[in-house]
Amino acid sequence: MSVQKPNEFNLLSKIFNILTEEKILNTTADDKIVDFLQPNELKVNFEKWLNSDTALSEPELEDVCRQVIRFSLKNRHPYYFSHMFGGVDPYGLAASWLTEAINGAQ
């Protein structure tokens, strides 16, 4: 009888859904470009995870991902203009995920 191990890659299968639900891959003009907090406010917001002595559960990791997304600049937003950013390139993103998965020596 083998011991069932939790699927360590389960979070990865949820990342695409999180990115979609948080409107990173489908940002509209009605969404905020950034939900800005001062650094000390960000620290308070993330302190419960930064000071944890135990491993986070999968739901907690998902919450961390959502919080990071929430307070990140949405450079795919239609009203965000920069000479350096033009949004997410789906082919580049897929290639990045593929090469990161293949190259386990990083």
Image (cartoon, rainbow, N blue to C red):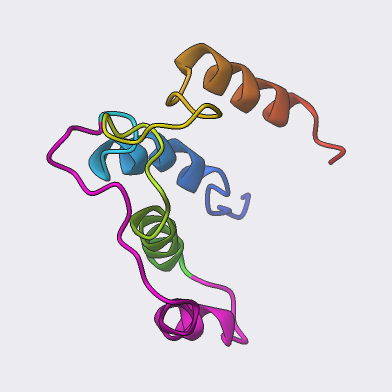
Counting every numbered tag in the picture gives 0
At which x and y percent is residue 94?
54, 19
At which x and y percent is residue 1?
61, 50
User: Is most of the magenta stretch helix, strand or loop?
Assistant: loop
Q: Is residue 94 above or below residue 79?
A: above
At 57% from the left and 85% from the top, the residue drawn is 52
At which x and y percent is residue 93?
54, 23
Report the span colored magenta. 27-56
- Give the image quarter of residue 20: top left
At which x and y percent is residue 46?
46, 77
- Give the image quarter of residue 31: top left
Report the front residue among 34 and 21. 34
* Residue 63 lies in the magenta-colored region: no
Give the side of residue 16 with respect to residue 10, left or right: left
Report the front residue among 48 and 78. 78
At 23% from the left and 49% from the top, the residue drawn is 32
Q: Residue furthest top?
A: 91
At 37% from the left and 31% from the top, the residue drawn is 76
